[in-house]
Amino acid sequence: MNDAEIRDQILAAFYGVWKERGFEVWVTLNELQQILAIDRIALARNLDLLAQIGLLERQGGMGGRGLYRITAQGVLECERKGLKPEPSLVRKE
């Protein structure tokens, strides 16, 4: 899987969170890695890029550390690309 495909998977996962729970849900690198089964280094690299270009918001450290959530720009990018929301990141309460 190339980096563009990894970024689409990440965005689809966060899009699913937004569709079910809105902007208030933060996700960790570990949660993403467990659900998406992507190499940790590749996942961290692409999370950082998505945060740097404003499609995700990062709270905490770089290099995949910290918490992430989708931004309004990220939602619009998912819709522009026709990505389907991935519901598996949403914790059922």
Image: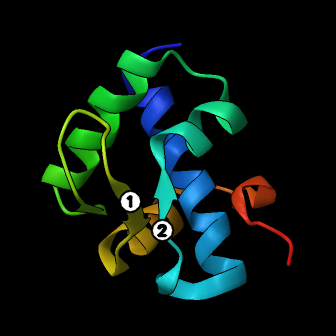
**Of residues 80 and 10, the one drawn nearer to the viewer in this rendering:** 10
**Residue at the (22%, 33%) spot, across then down:** 63
With 27 as the anchor, is 70 left or right in this view? left
Q: Amino acid at mark 2?
A: Trp
Q: CA distance from mark 1 to mark 2?
A: 5 Å
- Locate the C terminus and report the quarter of the image it occupies: bottom right
**Residue at the (64%, 69%) spot, across then down:** 17
Q: Position of residue 28 (x, y in %)?
A: 48, 50
Q: Tell me which label, 1 or 2, sits earlier in the chain.
A: 2
Quadrant in the picture for residue 56: bottom left
- Above or below residue 36? Residue 74 is below
**Residue at the (66%, 84%) spot, across then down:** 21
Q: Residues within 10 Å of mark 2 (few under 14, many from 20)?
A: some
With 86 as the anchor, is 51 left or right in this view? left
Whether the residues at callouts 1 and 2 have beta carbons within 8 Å, the answer is: yes
Q: Position of residue 74 (x, y in %)?
A: 37, 67
Q: Position of residue 47 (x, y in %)?
A: 33, 41
* Count of numbered circles in the view: 2
- Above or below residue 30? Residue 93 is below
Q: Which residue lies under the disc numbered 2? A: 26
SS assignment at label 1: strand
SS assignment at label 2: loop
Q: Amino acid at mark 1?
A: Tyr
Q: Which residue lies under the disc numbered 1? A: 68
- Locate the N terminus and report the quarter of the image it occupies: top right
Can residue 75 be seen in this snapshot? yes
**Of residues 66 and 14, the one drawn nearer to the viewer in this rendering:** 66
Q: Position of residue 22 (x, y in %)?
A: 57, 86
- Above or below residue 11? Residue 17 is below
